Image: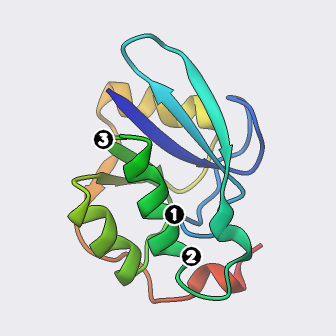
Amino acid sequence: MKIAITAQDKNLDADFDPRFGRCKYFVIVDLDTEEHRVEQNEGTTALGGAGIKSAQFLAGCEVSAVITGHVGPNASRALEAAGIKVFVMDSGTVRGAITAYKEGTLTQVSGATTDSHTGLNMS
């Protein structure tokens, strides 16, 4: 099973990025093998549709879940259509997010947790 975590840098000890569509990186972890890879988020520079683009990318990576801070309505619908579960957290590291997921302490959400274009105003 693969999960994706929104991250501000390219490693497991990187700070978690609360933005979904405009996060800097996705750390994709295979929970069965413990292997991971880092992918730069192409949605970061999108003028519009960043959340949808990011959701489509993760669907292509065959992830089952994403851990992020906020997800807008369009991204939420795209993730749901792809069968990707959304879990939220407030802060921490990528490694901490993985641990919290394994321990079952994250909150799963359905639907948007913020308005559209919120990530544009966050850095």
Residue 4 point in image, percent of width and height: 48, 42
Distance CA(mark 2)–CA(mark 1): 6 Å
Would residue 37 be found to the left or right of residue 110 on screen?
right
- Of labels 1 and 3, earlier in sequence is 1
Q: Of the residues shown, which amino acid type is indicated by label 1?
A: Ser
- Of labels 2 and 3, earlier in sequence is 2
Count residues near mark 1 (Cα–Cα under 10 Å), then give few for <14, some for 14-19, many for 20+.
many
Would residue 68 be found to the left or right of residue 106 on screen?
right
Query: Could you tell me which secondary element the residue under label 3 belongs to?
Result: loop
Residue in the picture at 76% in, 38% down? 10
Residue 90 point in image, percent of width and height: 53, 57
In the rendered image, the vertical position of residue 111 relative to residue 1, given as above or below: below
Residue in the picture at 72% in, 45% down? 15
Residue at the disc numbered 1: 54
Query: Could you tell me which secondary element the residue under label 1 belongs to?
Result: helix
Residue 121 point in image, percent of width and height: 70, 86
Quadrant in which the N terminus is drawn:
top left
Residue at the disc numbered 3: 64
Query: Could you tell me which secondary element the residue under label 2 belongs to?
Result: helix
In the rendered image, the vertical position of residue 119 relative to residue 80, given as above or below: below
Residue 25 numbered tag: none
Label tally? 3
Q: Of the residues shown, which amino acid type is indicated by label 3?
A: Ser
Residue at the disc numbered 2: 50
Whether label 2 touches label 1, CB < 8 Å: yes
Residue in the picture at 40% in, 73% down? 75
Q: Nearer the viewer, residue 100 or 31?
A: 31
